[in-house]
């Protein structure tokens, strides 16, 4: 320590001299020691404060009935989107599965044929499963998707009664998005411009 | 009815029914005091408190009671088994015994009591002193150093504050000239045109302040809840208790809280007399307001340090109470000529 430098006689000085109980204590800005009346006044101030809080409106959000608002970009459960003509957007490219840091997405692609056209591209996802127990809701799949097929919706109450029910299959994922979210996404370009803050990787 | 009451068997039947009714009323009141405390504390912290079980959460205590009753009756290793089980029983027994002598005004000139004793208030203090045994024995029998420390703290605290508590009421007795609780409530004055009962707080305001502080300390309530300090003693004497044995301590604490509130209402606020309000409602209202005061104090003040508690008890409250007794006695003697 700096203040333990040896002095002239070769012995270190005591680093911090022992202090008396009141030495070095800064003076009370409100003057000298308060009187009994001031102490009782302080107690009364405390009681007044808590009584004021008692009659103030509550700040609790009573959860199942009231829910706090979520951001537009909230990352809840996934949805697979369709085009307006009913074709699935997903082209089976598996970029979402590749982007997924925990590997919870399984995509098995199949070729589209003219008789059996599922998506506008060459291929479509024959199997599309997300293991919601593994998913960390990072939204990388949404970023990776070139056709904005997979999006994360606003729902967060995903608890269920068995592990099997957490493997979201294609049928479940193809459920329509809430209309307001769909309206927000509608008209957005297929590749959203990478502006700062759009995704964790953007702007780096 | 009076024939039946004077009959040897009928007398005991009536007393037994009266006791059962009173235990039922006090138990119910205790349950709703706990609910009231949790809701009031919640509002002080700007949250609603329990409001899920039943309308306004009124059935919360039933749910809690069922939960606690079905918990395992656990006995830690190397406890003094008999005392460990017996201590909570002392707490509950002492808490309920006080209600034997507390009169409840039902209607004008109709009161309810189990025993109309001419030393009523002394009996209440005697029973409330038993509470210290429950805490010390429970703390010692737990074979846990924190419990023992909690029990010892409690012994020192209760003995210190009991003196101030007792002395705070002496001026009341000097003025009224009786220890019977009914006589104290019925104390009437003739002040010019006014003739009737008055709240005795007008005559002994300092006595009430001392009583209030000492009663909070007697019932181990915040800010004097040192025996069960969660932070430094992990619950004190309650550490090793769970299930129904815990319930008994908990119950005793709240019964004591109602007891001291009811006593304050009787001794300082004119009991069941309040202008034109029906006696039962007046009594209930006073008790509820005093209970709110207790909860309000708990929601406001932090726990005292142990040496502060002792200093307050011995150096402030006790001398103040003694001076109060001397001054009141002098005034009463002077007034009587």
Image (spheres, rainbow, N blue to C red):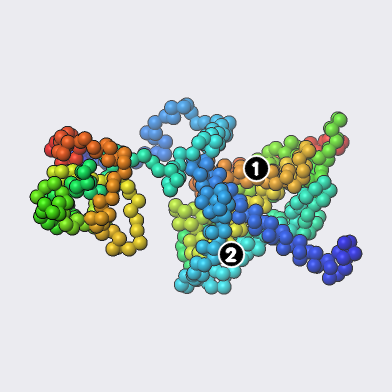
Q: Is residue B78 left or right of residue B62?
A: left
Do callouts 1 and 2 point to residues on the same chain? yes
Residue A20 in picture, x, y percent from top left: 40, 39
* Front residue (pair A92, A73): A92
Residue displayed at 14% across by 58% down = A108
For disc 1, the neighbor class at 10 Å (few under 14, some 14 to 19, many from 20) is few
Residue B223 in sight here: no
Q: What element carries label 2?
A: helix
Quadrant of res B17: bottom right
Q: In this view, does B279 lie to the left or right of A118?
A: right
Residue A31 sits above or below residue B285 on the image: above
Residue B199 in sight here: yes
Chain where mark 1 sits: B
Q: Which residue lies furthest to the front in this view?
A: A115
Q: Which of marks 1 and 2 is in front?
A: 1
In the rendered image, which residue does mark 1 sit on? B289
Answer with mark 1 or mark 2, whichever residue precedes in sequence: 2
* Quarter occupied by the N terminus of chain A: top left
Residue displayed at 61% across by 66% down = B89
For disc 2, the neighbor class at 10 Å (few under 14, some 14 to 19, many from 20) is many
Residue A97 in picture, x, y percent from top left: 15, 53
Quadrant of res A200: top left
Q: Residue furthest right?
A: B3
Quadrant of res A198: top left
Residue displayed at 38% across by 41% down = A68
Residue B75 in picture, x, y percent from top left: 49, 71
Residue B98 sits above or below residue A55 on the image: below
Residue B323 in picture, x, y percent from top left: 69, 40
Chain where mark 2 sits: B
- Whole-number angstrom distance, CA of label 1 to CA of label 2: 29 Å
Residue displayed at 53% across by 72% down = B80
In the rendered image, which residue does mark 2 sit on? B88
């Amino acid at each position: 320590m700096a203040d333990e430098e040896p002095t002239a006689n070769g012995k270190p000085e005591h680093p911090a001299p022992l202090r008396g109980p009141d030495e070095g204590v800064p003076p009370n800005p409100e003057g000298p020691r308060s009187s009994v009346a001031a102490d009782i006044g302080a107690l009364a101030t405390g009681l007044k404060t808590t009584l004021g809080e008692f009659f103030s409106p509550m700040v609790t959000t009573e959860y199942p009935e009231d829910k706090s608002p979520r951001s537009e970009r909230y990352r809840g459960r996934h949805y697979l989107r369709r085009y307006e003509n009913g074709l699935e957007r997903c082209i089976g490219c598996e970029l979402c599965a590749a982007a997924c840091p925990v590997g919870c997405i399984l995509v098995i692609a199949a070729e589209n044929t003219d008789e059996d056209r599922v998506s506008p591209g060459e291929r479509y996802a024959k199997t599309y499963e997300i293991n919601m127990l593994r998913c960390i809701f990072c939204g990388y799949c949404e970023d990776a998707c070139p056709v904005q097929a997979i999006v994360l919706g606003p729902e967060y109450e995903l608890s269920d009664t068995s592990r099997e029910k957490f493997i979201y299959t294609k049928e479940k994922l193809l459920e329509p998005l809430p209309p307001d979210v769909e309206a927000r996404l509608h008209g957005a370009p297929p590749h959203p411009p990478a502006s700062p803050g759009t995704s964790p990787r953007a702007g780096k | 009815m009076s024939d039946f009451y004077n009959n040897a068997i009928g007398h005991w039947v009536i007393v037994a029914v009266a006791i059962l009714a009173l235990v039922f009323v006090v138990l119910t009141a205790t349950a709703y005091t706990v609910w009231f405390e949790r809701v009031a504390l919640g509002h002080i912290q700007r949250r609603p408190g329990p409001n899920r079980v039943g309308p306004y959460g009124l059935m919360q205590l039933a749910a809690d009671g069922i939960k606690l009753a079905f918990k395992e009756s656990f006995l830690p290793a190397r406890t003094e088994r008999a005392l460990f089980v017996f201590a909570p029983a002392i707490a509950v027994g002492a808490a309920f015994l006080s209600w034997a002598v507390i009169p409840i005004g039902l209607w004008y000139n109709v009161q309810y009591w189990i025993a109309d004793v001419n030393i009523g208030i002394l009996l209440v203090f005697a029973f409330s002193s038993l509470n210290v045994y429950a805490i010390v024995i429970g703390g010692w029998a737990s074979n846990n150093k924190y419990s023992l420390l909690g029990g010892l703290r409690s012994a020192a605290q209760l003995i210190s504050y009991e003196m101030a508590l007792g002395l705070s009421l002496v001026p009341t007795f000097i003025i009224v000239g009786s220890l019977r609780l009914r006589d104290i409530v019925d104390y009437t004055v003739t002040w010019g045109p006014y003739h009737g009962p008055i709240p005795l707080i007008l005559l002994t305001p300092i006595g009430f302040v001392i009583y209030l502080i000492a009663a909070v300390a007697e019932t181990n309530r915040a800010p004097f809840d040192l025996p069960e300090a969660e932070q430094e003693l992990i619950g004190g004497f309650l550490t090793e208790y769970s299930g129904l044995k815990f319930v008994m301590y908990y119950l005793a604490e709240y019964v004591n809280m109602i007891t001291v509130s009811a006593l304050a209402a009787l001794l300082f606020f004119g009991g069941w007399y309040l202008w034109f309000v029906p006696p039962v409602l007046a009594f209930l209202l006073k008790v509820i307001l005093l209970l709110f005061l207790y909860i309000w104090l708990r929601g406001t003040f932090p726990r005292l340090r142990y040496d502060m508690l002792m200093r307050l008890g011995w150096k402030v409250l006790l001398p103040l109470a003694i001076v109060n007794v001397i001054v009141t006695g002098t005034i009463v003697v002077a007034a009587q000529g």
